[in-house]
């Protein structure tokens, strides 16, 4: 715990609910009080370390509810460890991640969770929690779900994609949803019709269509929409809430919007890659398109407008990264000559807060909506609010001093993720993280990393607060 009293002075405090010029007092790792700058109260906060936030924003640390550090995929592993990945997150103004522990078929949830605890323990620069990937639904798994909810792992991911690896059929999905309806857990769904997609993959390869761009062509938007629709109906039958991850297609957004109009507890997340990149990137020559292979895939640019609209209307509530980096050299290259062998995933944990600030600059969203979709809503969705996701008395002192005027150019040459390319290479942004506190401890100090592996604490979560 940080014993140092800290005052963040002179900034514009921006939360999902408010914007106010205020000083923030931090003690013992928590926010103790806010007071108008220059007021008697603020002036009485002496004998404290002062962080000057004049002409800057003071925002809650980002909550990234969807990362995959050290994830095994297609015979290799995601390139970021919990140590490198959480350090990069801190550089980008994110102070909490929720990563995915994986149950392998034939093994228990507990074995998967223990394995991920072992990977993360003592390694993280920022706080972290876990979701559980459920790959093998049977009576024992369902009983384990109750136990995990009891100890703060309150969300469970299932896959309608990847037959033979993570795939669950409709009966397994329904059983898990019924259990979640009873124990308060939240089912997170990768909604793509994997059985149909596999047929299209084989047909494309048989035609000699092997380039990365064909990854996007076979994983059709209609098959994302169909699976999203099916997941919503199964959740409705089970009486369970549903959270659809990495929504990329306007047809899938329409399914979510329709369900929400009907009053169903259905939620959706999208990711920066779907907001800022497109199939044009997948079509880059000389196998460069492999850098942009992820699932759900990047869509044609016209889908972006529907995603931005969904974020404005709250039919999409959260922007997470689905950070799952594989190096171009030696990892993405496994799929030369066969796009289906390209490891699926992209780096992004360091770029999310800045890209979304750029969206404020560009007029897509408001400042408060930026904080809502990047901090407050993910914290609420995954049972971390108000400890995380806001700046208020009693909240953890996860605070970012953000310079809204600084200009930067994203590049692999300067990023801190353990991957040999940037998905946003050369993109110019306005706005940059300057200083980051995690539970009152300086982890980035005026653009220098001052944190350490092991500061980050495992954080049990309550159930979904929606």
Image: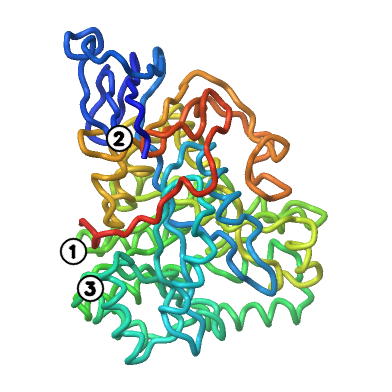
**Label 3 CA crowd tier, 10 Å (few <14, some 14–19, many 20+):** many
The image's mark for residue 240 is: 3
- The image shows residue 236 at horizontal and vertical percentages of 22, 75
Q: How many marks?
A: 3
Q: Residue at x 52, y 37 (%)?
A: 451
- The image shows residue 27 at horizontal and vertical percentages of 28, 30
Mark with earlier residue (2, 3): 2
Seen in the picture, residue 396 relative to 385 is either above or below; the reply is above
Q: Marks 1 and 3, Cα distance to the nearest angstrom?
A: 15 Å
Q: Marks 1 and 2, Cα distance to the nearest angstrom?
A: 45 Å
For this rendering, which residue is in front, 344 or 152?
A: 152
The image's mark for residue 262 is: 1
Seen in the picture, residue 222 relative to 111 is either above or below; the reply is above
**Label 2 CA crowd tier, 10 Å (few <14, some 14–19, many 20+):** some
Seen in the picture, residue 285 relative to 390 is either above or below; the reply is below
For this rendering, which residue is in front, 50 or 220?
A: 50
Seen in the picture, residue 172 relative to 285 is either above or below; the reply is below
Q: Is residue 261 left or right of residue 398?
A: left
Q: Residue at x 35, y 49 (%)?
A: 310
The residue under label 2 is 28
Give the mark toward the camera: 2 or 3. Answer: 2
- Colour option used: rainbow
Q: Is residue 458 left or right of residue 47?
A: right
């Amino acid at each position: 715990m940080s014993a140092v009293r800290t005052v963040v002075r002179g900034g514009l405090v921006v939360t999902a609910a408010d914007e106010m010029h205020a000083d923030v007092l931090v003690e013992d790792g928590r926010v103790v009080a806010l007071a108008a700058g220059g007021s008697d109260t603020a002036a009485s906060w002496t004998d404290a370390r002062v962080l000057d936030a004049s002409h800057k924003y003071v925002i809650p640390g980002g909550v990234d509810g969807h990362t995959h550090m050290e994830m095994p995929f297609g015979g290799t592993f995601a390139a970021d460890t919990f140590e490198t990945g959480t350090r990069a997150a801190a550089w980008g103004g994110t102070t909490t991640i929720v990563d995915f522990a994986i149950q392998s078929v034939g093994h228990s949830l507990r074995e998967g969770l223990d394995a991920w605890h072992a990977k993360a323990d003592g390694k993280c620069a920022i706080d972290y929690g876990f979701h559980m990937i459920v790959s093998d639904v049977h009576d024992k798994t369902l009983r384990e779900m109750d136990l995990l909810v009891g100890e703060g792992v309150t969300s469970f991911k299932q896959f309608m994609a990847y037959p033979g690896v993570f795939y669950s059929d409709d009966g397994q999905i329904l059983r898990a949803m019924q259990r979640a309806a009873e124990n308060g857990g939240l089912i997170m769904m990768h909604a793509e019709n994997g059985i149909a997609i596999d047929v299209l993959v084989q047909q494309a390869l048989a035609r000699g269509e092997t380039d990365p761009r064909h990854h996007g062509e076979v994983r059709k938007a209609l098959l994302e929409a169909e699976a999203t629709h099916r997941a919503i109906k199964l959740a409705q039958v089970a009486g369970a809430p549903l959270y659809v991850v990495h929504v990329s297609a306007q047809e899938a957004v329409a399914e979510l919007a329709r369900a929400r109009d009907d009053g169903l507890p259905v939620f959706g997340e999208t990711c920066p890659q779907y907001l800022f990149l497109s199939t044009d990137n997948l079509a880059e020559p000389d196998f460069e398109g492999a850098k942009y292979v992820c699932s759900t895939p990047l869509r044609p640019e016209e889908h972006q407008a529907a995603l931005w609209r969904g974020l404005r209307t709250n039919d999409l509530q959260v922007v997470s990264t689905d950070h799952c980096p594989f190096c171009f050299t030696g990892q993405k290259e496994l799929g030369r000559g066969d796009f289906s062998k390209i490891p699926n995933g992209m780096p992004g944990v360091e770029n999310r807060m800045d890209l979304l600030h750029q969206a404020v600059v560009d007029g897509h969203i408001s400042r408060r909506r930026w904080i809502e979709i990047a901090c407050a809503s993910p914290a609420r969705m995954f049972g971390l609010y108000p400890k995380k996701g806001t700046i208020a008395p009693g909240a953890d002192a996860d605070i970012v001093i953000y310079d809204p005027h600084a200009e930067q150019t994203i590049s692999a040459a300067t990023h801190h993720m353990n991957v040999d390319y940037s998905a946003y290479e050369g993109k110019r942004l306005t706005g940059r993280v300057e200083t980051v506190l995690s539970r009152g401890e300086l982890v980035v100090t005026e653009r220098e990393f001052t944190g350490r592996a092991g500061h980050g604490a495992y954080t049990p979560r309550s159930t979904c607060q929606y």
